[in-house]
Image: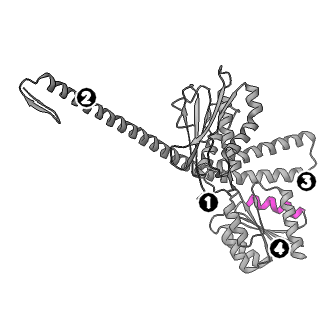
């Protein structure tokens, strides 16, 4: 089963995404902050990470860099509240697969995740 | 008797010639002083205007930072509500009534998202899509879009393009948005007025290397108490539900991003004139 890690400091975001992605057949994990996210990446080796850009403490961009050092094949999808093209461009340059803006369209999220999973698993 | 001034002094009773000369000199001094005073007053007015624009600019920048932060905080809970509603409609068997209610909630959420995204754009850097454009084409396009409304309201468009203005570098869609906002306000201001004229003029600005667009209406003008508030977010004189009060705020931010200026004055018709000054740039990077 393909594994997805949801990283967001809002527990309710983790809960909704866990419920949705589990219903689509994925094994879903969550982390409420950057350091926990990096530990989880090492521990569960997710195929996809849904990563909030703005989080207290360690921000999404720093987490992205660290994930890249652990496993560069992980498909990191950044999530941002306000469409900030400069930040998104920077995230893509640093190896993020895509970025989504809030409020998230769950149908679109499902498609983006599926495309990356197919790409990863060949 | 000794008569003394800056240039003349004589003793005893002056003869007519001396008096005439003295009066002439005095008149010249008076004229020169009057001119100097006029110049000083003009310089003072200009300084006051610059000061007011600076205060306005600083105030809007501060509001922009604040509102961008608020927009970000609002979008987080909105995201959760939106995802919950999507999940409900995907997974539950809902009655028609519940489905209608859900649809209303989604539409209202989209409204919140629209407002917060508009609010957030003042301080956020934009992906610039600058192209070299002829301002005449940009204004012409907006006027063509507004033509049905102008016809419906019986407004006469009086347009004067300066013949030799150079093409300028701008984000065309966003400048069109500004012109559209200003024209929409002008149309709204003229509802119920006897004379309805929308005048659009382009010309070289008094500031070198800038182009000025003047958009004037024959509405009732801007109340002096509101003049410093019209670019504030959510400021509107329209009835509730007729406007969010974000149009001019966004327009101001777009013009500022282009390195230009946007301001308003009341005109000789008793209506308002909005002035948009845009720099003439030759490079692809406006910053």
Disc 3/disc 2 C-alpha distance (Å): 92 Å
Q: Residue at x 66, y 43 (%)?
A: B178
Residue segment shown in magenta: A11-23
Q: Residues within 10 Å of mark 3 (few under 14, many from 20)?
A: few
Disc 1/disc 2 C-alpha distance (Å): 54 Å
On screen, residue B182 above or below B166: above
Residue B174 coordinates in the image, percent (x, y): 68, 48
Q: Residues within 10 Å of mark 4 (few under 14, many from 20)?
A: many
Q: For the residues carrying marks 4 and 2, which lies nearer the camera in this image?
A: 2
- Whether residue B114 is visible, yes or no, is yes
Is residue A101 on the magenta stretch? no
Q: Residues within 10 Å of mark 2 (few under 14, many from 20)?
A: few
Q: Are marks 1 and 3 on the same chain?
A: yes
User: Of helix, strand and loop, which one carries label 1?
Assistant: loop
Disc 1/disc 3 C-alpha distance (Å): 53 Å
* Residue at mark 1: chain: B
**Label ID, residue B283:** 1
């Amino acid at each position: 089963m393909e594994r997805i890690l949801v990283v967001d400091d809002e527990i309710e975001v983790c809960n909704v995404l866990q419920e949705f992605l589990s219903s689509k057949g994925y094994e879903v994990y969550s982390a409420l902050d950057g350091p926990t996210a990096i530990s989880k990446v090492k521990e569960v080796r997710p195929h996809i990470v849904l990563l909030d850009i703005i989080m207290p403490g360690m921000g999404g961009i720093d987490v992205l860099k660290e994930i890249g050092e652990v496993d560069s094949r992980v498909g990191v999808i950044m999530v941002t509240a306000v469409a900030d093209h400069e930040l998104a461009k920077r995230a893509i340059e640093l190896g993020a697969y895509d970025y989504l803006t809030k409020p998230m369209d769950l149908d679109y999220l499902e498609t983006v995740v599926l495309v990356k999973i197919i790409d990863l698993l060949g | 008797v000794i008569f003394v001034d800056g240039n003349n002094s004589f003793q005893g009773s002056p003869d007519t010639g001396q008096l005439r000369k003295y009066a002439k000199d005095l008149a010249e001094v008076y004229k020169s002083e009057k001119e100097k005073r006029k110049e000083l007053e003009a310089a003072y007015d200009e300084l006051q205007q610059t000061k007011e624009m600076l205060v306005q600019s600083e105030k809007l920048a501060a509001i922009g930072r604040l509102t961008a932060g608020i927009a970000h905080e609002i979008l987080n809970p909105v995201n959760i509500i939106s995802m919950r509603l999507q999940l409900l409609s995907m997974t539950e068997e809902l009655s028609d009534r519940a489905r209608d209610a859900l649809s209303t909630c989604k539409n209202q959420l989209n409204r919140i998202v629209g407002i917060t995204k508009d609010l957030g754009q003042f301080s956020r850097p934009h992906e610039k899509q600058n192209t070299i454009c002829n301002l005449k084409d940009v204004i012409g396009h907006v006027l063509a879009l507004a033509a049905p409304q102008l016809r419906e309201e019986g407004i006469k468009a009086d347009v004067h393009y300066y013949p030799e203005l150079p093409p300028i570098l701008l984000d065309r869609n966003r400048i069109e948005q500004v012109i559209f906002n200003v024209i929409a306000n002008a149309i709204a201001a003229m509802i119920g007025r006897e004379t309805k004229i929308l005048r659009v003029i382009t010309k070289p600005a008094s500031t070198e290397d800038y182009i000025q667009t003047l958009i004037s209406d024959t509405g009732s003008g801007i109340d002096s108490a509101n003049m410093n508030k019209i670019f504030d977010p959510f400021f509107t004189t329209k009835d509730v539900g007729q406007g969010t009060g974000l149009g001019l705020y966004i327009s101001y931010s777009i013009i500022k991003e282009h390195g230009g200026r946007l301001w308003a004055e009341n005109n000789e018709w008793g209506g308002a004139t909005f002035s948009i000054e845009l720099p003439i740039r030759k490079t692809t990077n406006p910053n």
